[in-house]
Amino acid sequence: MLIAGETVLQNRLSTVGFVVFWLGCMVFTAMAIGAALVDLFRVRTENRDAQRALIEETLREVEREKLRRKDTDAGSEQGKK
């Protein structure tokens, strides 16, 4: 759109048409920036949620392993008595 506006359309559009064309270009650019920002915030939110879930799952695994070892150690001590 930039190349067309500066070359082909510059001589063919009236002053008002030229301004409207460039306003349309600005609107499309603003929409693209808005879509990029929405995507950025969505990806950041998903990433934060995934990290939180990973940390919680890791902590649960550590707790299960701790309990398993405690049970195993208690069982082996009873066997020795």
Image: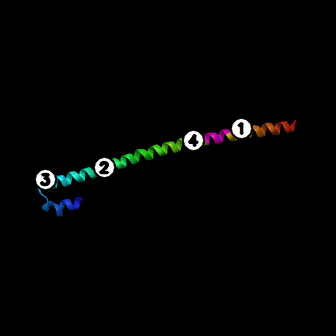
Q: Secondary structure at mark 3?
A: helix
Whole-Å distance between the Cαs marked 2 and 1? 54 Å
Q: Going 76% across and 38% down the picture, which residue do you hit?
A: 71
Q: Nearer the viewer, mark 3 or mark 4?
A: 3
Three-letter code for the amino acid on which mark 4 is drawn: Ile
Three-letter code for the amino acid on which mark 3 is drawn: Val
Q: Contact, CB < 8 Å: mark 3 with mark 4?
A: no
Three-letter code for the amino acid on which mark 1 is drawn: Leu
Q: Is residue 61 magenta?
A: yes
Q: How many marks?
A: 4
Of labels 3 and 4, earlier in sequence is 3
Of labels 3 and 1, earlier in sequence is 3
Q: Say which residue label 1 marks.
A: 67
**Residue range highlighted in magenta:** 58-63
Of labels 4 and 2, earlier in sequence is 2
Main secondary structure type of the part rendered in magenta:
helix
Q: Secondary structure at mark 2?
A: helix
Q: Secondary structure at mark 4?
A: helix
Q: Say which residue label 3 marks.
A: 16
Q: Say which residue label 4 marks.
A: 55
Which circle marks residue 31 in the picture? 2
